[in-house]
Each structure stands twice: as C-alpha cells, then as structure tokens.
Image: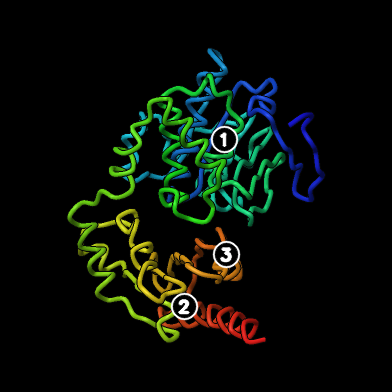
Amino acid sequence: MGIPKLIEKVLGVEVIMKHILEVLGDARTIGIAGHVRPDGDCVGSCLALYYYLKKATGEGIRVDLYLEPIPEKFKTVGNTDIIKQENEESIKYDLFIALDSGSLDRLGFAQEYFLAANKTLNIDHHISNTRFAGTNHVEDNASSTCEVLFGLFEEDKIDLTIAKALYLGIIHDTGVFKHSNTSEKTMMIAGKLITKGVPFSQMIDETFYLKNYHQNQMLGRCLLESILVLHGKCIVSSVSKKTLEFYDSTSADLDGIIDQLRITEGVEVAILLYETDLHEYKVSMRANGFVDVRKIAAYFGGGGHIKAAGCTMHGTIHDVVNNLTAHIEHQLSNQTSEQEQ
C-alpha cells in the first residue's frame, strides 16, 4: 500500500491507512462507538477494535466502548459486559473512533465524547459517509466495516475473540455472503478468520437464523399483513409500537423479516416499516434488481447501500409508503424506458 495518501476534505482529512496503530500517536485514552440501534457489523466492528487495541497497545492505555443495548444473539461473540450503554462520566478522550456510522448524528449519546475528543477517527464502508471526523478512513467498496478493520489489523494479533467479532460483522452485512457487496476479498478474509477457529456454522445459525417464539410470531404477522404494490414489484409490511408491545418485542426482533419479504417472487423492492414514535417510522429497504434504494434513503436523510438502505420518515404510514413508492416507481419507469429504446 505504500506511504499513506492524504487527501484534504472539507470536514477533515481522508487517509488511507496501512495499520490502525498509525493514528494512535501518543493517545492514552481511546473511546469507541458505533451507530444507534447496533446491527451485526456495528457490534462486530466495535468489539473487534476494542479487543484488538487492548491486545496491541498493552498496559497503560484506557479503551472504552459505547453502544446502545445490543441484541441478545450477539452477546455470544465475546464478553459484552465491557460495553458502556450511557454517558457514565465526564471525560475528554485523546482519541475517539466512530465505527460503521455514516454521519455524526448516528453516534447517538456517544456524540458528546466524540465532539469533546482531542482527535477523532471515522472508519466505515458506507458510500454515503459524510467524512465527519478529523481523520476519515472509508472504504466504500468493502462489504462491511469489519472487512475494513481486518485490513487494518496485523493478522498475527487476531485471536479467536477478535476473529469471531469480525466474522459476525461480515456475515450480517453480506447476508451470509449472498448480497452483491460480497467480493472475492470478502470470501478470502472469511476463510482466514475460519482458520483462527471461528465456529462459522454455529455463529451463522445462532446470530442470523435462530429465532425465538416471539420473533417467529412477528415474522408471521408481518408476512400475513404485507401488501403488494406497484403491480407486484414492491412488497410492504409495517409494525406499530402497539404490536411490538403486544408481542413483548423490540426492533431487534424484526431482524430477518425484510429479507424474507425480499425473496417474494416478482418483487423488485421490499419495504419494512416500524413505528418509533407518533407519526415516525424507521424504514428498511432491500432491492433485488436495478433499483438503487440507497438513493431513495439518502433523499429522506438516510443512507446505506445500493441493495440495502434505510432512513427515518415522518407522517402517517400512508404518507410514508406513498412517498417511498413514488421514488421506486420513478426508477422502475426509467429502467423500462431505457430497455425500450
């Protein structure tokens, strides 16, 4: 990779690092945070970096990890008791690292520490990343932030705990290697992690496919109440706060539903909405064909990938669905016109 290439950015410096330790300098206190409502890649990258820094920096370096409560299924990856889930004290970190977060607001309660830190670093793989840190390392061709981190770690320092955390992020952001963001490099990295002893079959079952009874009930209800729109090209399902409370569930119990909707025959785009407040909905979108859901999410203040993206929208559920499907229909119409020319 050679000498790191520095490119001046409006919001900071974009840097191509060869190793994560390059940016630590004389930092004695390091904070780490991922995005709100942490998913597999967020949890995996945060845990992997925490344990790697603890191992690589030795004694005398304080490393703290901040995340909102994580899904139970991810707690088997490592000791998650080290995660701080609130602002426990007033501290000014020498370095604060944001992972898997496309913009500053995605850090949630940890923004306070990020903004106060002497130096900030942003490591991510989302093409929509706003480069909000003092130093930014964004590889938008990578499958996941965990894939990015693997390239920044020395392989001989990756033990089983770190390998499991990295593998978690990769399998969740690639949909167990079936999404279009899966590359030859992704598969090679996964293979190297397996050689570290990662129980890959067990991890895939336990963190990706295994569901409890309430989760299966939610899946069944979402499938039963889904509707087809745009002449069967789009499938939509929604979950109200009242429904989540009835099933004693949280948003984490909705994992996997959007992918089940997506594989409906004839569907180009799947949409799953869940109510977070009065007239406020978290939107998840998945695409099968040529529709770029990232563009749609970005229009409404969100982000993600071409085939998988999300955002938060306000209004009645009918307003939200109508606004989203208008954009989907526009892309479908453009594609039809191009094919006819």
Which three-letter amino acid code belongs to the residue tagged 3?
Arg
Give whichever of 91, 168 is nearer the camera.
168
| 103 shown above or below 232 | above
Question: Looking at the image, which residue is at 46% across and 73% down?
Answer: 268
Residue beneath disc 3: 294
* Callout 1 crowding tier (Cα within 10 Å): few <14, some 14–19, many ≥20: many
Q: Secondary structure at mark 2?
A: helix
Q: How far apart are labels 3 and 1 at the CA level?
A: 23 Å
Total labels drawn: 3
Dot 3 and dot 2 residues touching (CB under 8 Å): no
Dot 3 and dot 1 residues touching (CB under 8 Å): no
Give whichever of 87, 269 is nearer the camera.
269
Residue beneath disc 2: 320
Q: Position of residue 172 (x, y in %)?
A: 42, 48
Residue 281 is tagged as: none
* Callout 2 crowding tier (Cα within 10 Å): few <14, some 14–19, many ≥20: some
Residue 149 is tagged as: 1
* Callout 3 crowding tier (Cα within 10 Å): few <14, some 14–19, many ≥20: many
